[in-house]
Image (spheres, rainbow, N blue to C red):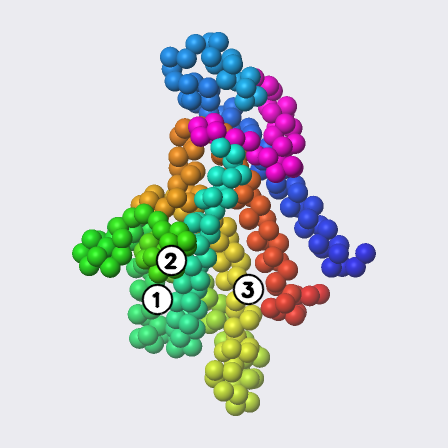
């Protein structure tokens, strides 16, 4: 077996192991809840007969290992069960909410990187200058502001005061691209501002370290253009940690930006999780956990594969 296939097999085994552990933990959460799901759903006035009937209908009268095996059997066939509250299939609900959070996540991540990368290179190439100090202090200042405060400020300035954007709500792509972007602009900007400082600080530090290496000094002495050195010799080795952090950020945002989605009234995964946890909608919580786990593992696998492409020295 070639080293590539060996590495890929190892990563696939890791993926399966992580998913099994995460889904087991999701099933075990039932036993950690302060009250029985039946009582949370039916109310404190429910009789013992009603509780027993509810538990039998949803399988909560079985031991946890049996519950997990039954759930896993359905999950392998694409059936994650039905929501306790709405009665709708969990898969259908997740697929209905996923496009909202996915659009929010992708646009916010792209915007934050589009701002952070050029500013980090500008600051690192002019280390300890006025520009570097201004940019670094601005990033530190933005980093210290909680995301809900950023969201409220954006709503007040661009929605309440100027009326340029709606205060809250959502318009799907079917309503038109322009209308969709009007509703998504402020949430995306709030998330991008919250993520930009971490990307900026990380990349600035790595670019400064790369600029102080011998091969960059050699390229400079050879008279190569500054822009060529930055793009050809600095960008790729400095971007590896940034790619890792960006991938983790993507998974975290896709898991549901609870604060932003709640503040702007977006029908995404974050809002769904916020509704499902206090109402103890077990099948929905398990579905969200599985989706998040799969996202994280697949992204981390893709990032590991990309390292050898970006830096040939890592292929060995």
Q: Quadrant of the C terminus?
A: bottom right
> Which residue in the structure is indicated by mark 2?
176
- Badge 1 vs badge 2, beta-carbon distance below 8 Å: no
Q: Nearer the viewer, mark 1 or mark 3?
A: 3
Against 308, residue 92 (above or below) is above
On screen, residue 73 above or below 101 = above
Residue 269 seen from this side = yes
Q: Nearer the viewer, residue 289 or 237?
A: 289
User: The N terminus lies in which quarter of the figure?
Assistant: bottom right
Reading the image, the residue beneath label 3 is 240
User: Farthest residue in the left direction?
Assistant: 161
Q: Are marks 2 and 3 in contact (CB under 8 Å)?
A: no
Going from the N terminus, do you reach mark 1 or mark 2 first?
1
Q: Which residues are magenta?
A: 60-87
Structural distance between the alpha carbons of marks 1 and 3: 21 Å
**Spot occupied by residue 158 in the image (x, y as percentages of width and height):** 24, 58
- Find the residue positioned furthest to the bottom: 223
Whether label 1 touches label 3, CB < 8 Å = no
Q: CA distance from mark 2 to mark 3?
A: 37 Å
Residue at (31% x, 65% y) in the render: 137
User: Would residue 46 be found to the left or right of residue 264 on screen?
Assistant: right
Sort mark 3 into few (<14), some (14-19) or many (20+) by Cα contacts within 10 Å.
some
């Amino acid at each position: 077996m070639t080293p590539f296939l060996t590495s890929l097999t190892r990563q696939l085994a890791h993926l399966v192991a992580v998913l099994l552990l995460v889904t087991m933990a999701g099933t075990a959460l039932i036993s950690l809840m302060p009250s029985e799901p039946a009582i949370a759903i039916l109310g404190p006035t429910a009789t013992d007969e009603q509780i027993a009937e509810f538990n039998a209908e949803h399988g909560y009268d079985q031991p946890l290992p049996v519950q997990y095996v039954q759930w896993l059997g359905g999950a392998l066939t694409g059936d994650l069960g039905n929501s306790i509250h709405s009665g709708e299939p969990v898969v259908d609900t997740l697929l209905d909410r996923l496009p909202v959070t996915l659009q929010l996540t992708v646009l916010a991540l792209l915007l934050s990187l589009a701002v952070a990368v050029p500013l980090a290179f500008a600051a690192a190439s002019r280390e300890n200058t006025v520009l570097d100090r201004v940019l670094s202090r601005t990033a530190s200042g933005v980093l210290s502001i909680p995301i809900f405060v950023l969201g409220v400020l954006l709503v007040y300035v661009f929605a309440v005061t100027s009326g340029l954007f709606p205060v809250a709500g959502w318009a799907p792509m079917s309503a038109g691209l322009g209308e969709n972007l009007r509703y998504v602009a402020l949430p995306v900007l709030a998330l991008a501002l919250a993520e930009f400082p971490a990307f900026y600080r990380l990349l600035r530090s790595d670019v400064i370290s790369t600029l102080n290496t011998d091969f960059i000094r050699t390229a400079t002495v050879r008279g190569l253009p500054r822009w060529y050195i930055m793009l050809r010799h600095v960008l790729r080795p400095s971007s590896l940690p940034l790619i890792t952090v960006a991938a983790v950020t993507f998974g975290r945002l896709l898991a549901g930006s609870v604060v932003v989605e709640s503040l702007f009234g977006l029908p995404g995964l974050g809002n769904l999780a916020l509704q499902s946890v206090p109402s103890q909608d077990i099948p929905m919580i398990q579905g969200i956990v599985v989706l998040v786990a799969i996202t994280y593992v697949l992204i981390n696998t893709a990032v590991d594969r990309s390292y050898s492409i970006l830096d040939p020295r890592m292929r060995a």
